[in-house]
Image: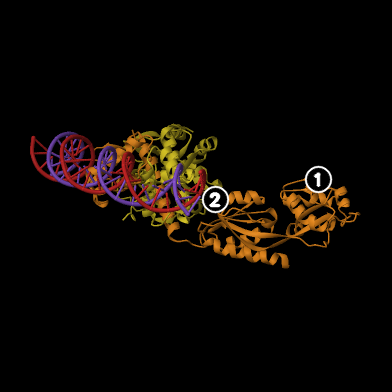
Chain colours: A yellow, B orange, C purple, D red
DNA sequence: GTTTTATGATAATTTAATGTTATGTATGCT
DNA sequence: AGCATACATAACATTAAATTATCATAAAAC
């Protein structure tokens, strides 16, 4: 009858006290109840578990194997509930998980800087989820992260967005590229190295700088694809194509000698939006991180 | 009003389902209850926690910080209860803690051999508590261990003891001892290196072998004491005294060249009793360990 | 061995809690 | 604006749990 029901925590409490005192009557007194109540609690627990929890031996009793297991479980549960209450009572800005989603390039830039806060306050746990814009927003909606940084404004009214900075975009070609990087046909013959958000970046940068590509520019000739930020520039360095990336990602590439950043007539930056759910109170620890992210992103375009 | 009460697990279950569905009505249907019931469960939880768990936003809702914390707690609790039920249902002989108390010399002999079972079955966790006889029995009484090996029979009727073997005792003197080890006066002038159970061992071995020490032998001239089994023979090796130890402990000493085991006219062994509580059903995993311990101890005196 | 005392089990009753029906209220959509 | 949907609230019904009173049993005392 009780097989499916969950264990009643009050009964567990009685059981724990019973194992402490070794007496039904004392347990009842200490818990402010009567002796038959203790007997009933124990009986209920035994019904739920489906096995006796104690074996009566003369006056006293010993725990059965099941009783021993249940006692361990109950003690653990008590501790955890106490922990929960402590966590709820104090919203410590230096304790807890901080979950953020952003692009690979933002992670490259922000992660090491934000991690320092965690080494100062070991109670913190920074979790950064690298994802393209739409996926970041999806993670936010599903409460898998509490903050995200995206380069698009959304229509979703349930979110709040703050413009915190701009991320300069770069057109990168091989160092030994002998075409004219101001002529789109030359780029097209070289080929585009695609990556997550690659199409988005490309369109943002190419449209103002290459008037010859009118509207139907959607299909670039693609000669490569990889979703590892640190390796996107590898095929470019080998002369296999050009790509468009945020400046921070380009700067962190090792073989700078093998790539070339093209000077643009119309510099392009992607706006950065720190995004959170509107009707959601974030824990105190997010204050520092929100402020720091805004600060770091603000420095980005100026540096 | 509910501040002191423990969290009701059924309400938690409802809350978890509510976060899954996002709808009160659906939650009610899926849990076989009515919608007002869900509302009430949530309200009760909020009273217990002392803070709102959700913020209603138009039709739907979002979790508050407290709600998020509580959800995490509830999910963890659910998992743990499932684990408990699994552990109770199957008394797997290859899973769980095995808690044993014994003397240092027995641990030296048994621990490596018993540990092999743990490496074969990684679900096992062997915990050996090294303690003198009386302390081992005390640990057993307090349920801090489930088995112990002692060299004394107890009067406590709540325990069962099986004689599983005999532990030969050795009289050990420095290798360069130039007295006569059959004459107690010579030993006495050398001095006794004491250790836990040292007095007990000494009395057991000396009494039958040295008739000259009559009854009042209790006070040996002591020239050293240490409670680290592996180091008891260090002072003996340095010529600072003699001692009495189980053979297994002597054999494991590194500097065998510096010590000498005295041949005895009356060999003495300490009986070994595997001891457990009488009215206590041990988990299945103890079967193998009990049998193995008995087997290993049986081989002890013959080897 | 019998009596006494202490302790837990059981039954019947009272009390409290939990769940349900019926109804009210707010939000979102056409 | 008005209808539909979804949750809140109140009054009532049901079920669970606690208490009192009583009984059974085991250790202790005589």
Quadrant of the drawing holding the N terminus of chain A: bottom left
Residue A105 vertical position relative to residue B128 in the rendered view, above or below? above
Return the x and y of residue B254 as percentages of the image width and height. Answer: 78, 56
Q: Quadrant of residue A87?
A: top left
User: Label 1 lies in what chain?
Assistant: B
Task: Look at 45% across and 57% down and name the residue there.
Answer: B87
Return the x and y of residue B79 as percentages of the image width and height. Answer: 41, 51
State the residue in front, D22 or B299: D22
State the residue in front, B238 or C6: C6
Residue highlighted by disc 2: B143
Residue A277 vertical position relative to residue B302 in the rendered view, above or below? above
Q: Quadrant of residue B299?
A: bottom right
Say the numbered circle drawn on residue B271: none
Q: Position of B137 compared to B13: left or right?
A: right
State the residue in front, A260 or B203: B203
State the residue in front, A108 or D7: D7
The CA span between labels 1 and 2 is 35 Å
Q: Position of C14 compared to A264: left or right?
A: left
Residue highlighted by disc 1: B222
Residue at the far right: name it.
B178
Q: Can residue A246 be spotted in the picture? A: no
């Amino acid at each position: 009858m009780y097989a499916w029901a969950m264990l009643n925590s009050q009964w567990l409490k009685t059981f724990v006290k019973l194992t402490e005192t070794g007496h039904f009557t004392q347990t009842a007194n200490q818990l402010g109840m009567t002796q038959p109540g203790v007997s009933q609690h124990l009986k209920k627990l035994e019904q739920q578990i489906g096995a006796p929890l104690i074996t009566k031996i003369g006056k006293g009793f010993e725990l059965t194997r099941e009783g021993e297991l249940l006692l361990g479980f109950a003690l653990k549960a008590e501790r955890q509930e106490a922990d929960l209450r402590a966590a709820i009572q104090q919203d410590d800005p230096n304790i807890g998980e901080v979950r953020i989603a952003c692009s690979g390039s933002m992670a490259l830039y922000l992660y090491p800087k934000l991690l320092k806060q965690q080494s100062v306050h070991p109670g913190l746990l920074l979790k950064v989820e690298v994802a393209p814009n739409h996926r970041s927003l999806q993670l936010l909606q599903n409460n898998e992260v509490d903050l995200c940084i995206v380069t698009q404004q959304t229509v979703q009214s349930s979110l709040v967005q703050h413009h915190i900075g701009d991320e300069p975009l770069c057109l990168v070609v091989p160092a030994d590229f002998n075409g004219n990087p101001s002529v789109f046909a030359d780029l097209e013959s070289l080929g585009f190295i695609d990556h997550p958000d690659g199409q988005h970046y490309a369109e943002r940068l190419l449209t103002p700088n290459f008037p010859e590509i009118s509207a139907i520019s959607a299909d670039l000739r693609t000669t490569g694809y990889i979703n590892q930020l640190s390796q996107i520039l590898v095929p470019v360095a080998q002369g296999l194509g050009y790509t468009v990336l945020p400046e921070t990602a380009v700067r962190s590439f090792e073989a700078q000698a093998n790539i070339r950043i093209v000077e643009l007539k119309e510099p392009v930056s992607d706006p950065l939006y720190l995004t959170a759910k509107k009707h959601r109170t974030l824990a105190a620890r997010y204050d520092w991180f929100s402020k720091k992210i805004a600060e770091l992103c603000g420095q980005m375009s100026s540096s």
